[in-house]
Amino acid sequence: MSDHPCHSAEKSGLNRASGQIEGIKKMIDEGRYCPDILTQLRAVRSSLKSIEANILERHLGHCVSDAINSENKKDIYKKIEEIKDIFKRYDD
């Protein structure tokens, strides 16, 4: 089985989301209008969902694919259980 895939491409998106969160904290300190804050929160959420989707896609294409190609039933079942657990934790 090979190593984990690289997720360094997601760091720029995470840095952007971190900057957005700092901006939201500043908006709160400034007493900005609620809908403006909510709009920025939604933007951060959307950004994080995109990063999450990219990492999940990479996991499926790399880690799960490797398990399937290994033909080791134990590895395949383990990856299936991991995916099921991931989706159970999703709340939206």
Image (tube, rainbow, N blue to C red):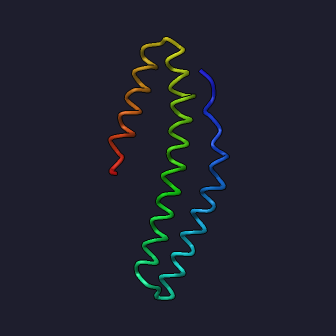
Across and down, in percent, residue 18 comes to 58, 65
Across and down, in percent, residue 61 comes to 55, 29
- Quadrant where the N terminus lies? top right
Q: Residue at x 40, y 26 (%)?
A: 80
Q: Quadrant of residue 13?
A: bottom right
**Which residue ends up furthest to the bottom in the rendered image?**
30
Across and down, in percent, residue 52 comes to 50, 47
Q: Residue at x 54, y 81 (%)?
A: 26
Q: Is residue 4 above or below residue 74?
A: below
Count of numbered circles on the image:
0
Q: Residue at x 62, y 62 (%)?
A: 16
Across and down, in percent, residue 25 comes to 51, 77
Depth check, front residue: 71 or 30: 30
Is residue 87 found left or right of 42 in the rendered image? left
Q: Is residue 47 above or below residue 27?
A: above
Q: Residue at x 36, y 33 (%)?
A: 84
Q: Is residue 7 above or below residue 83?
A: below
Depth check, front residue: 66 or 43: 43
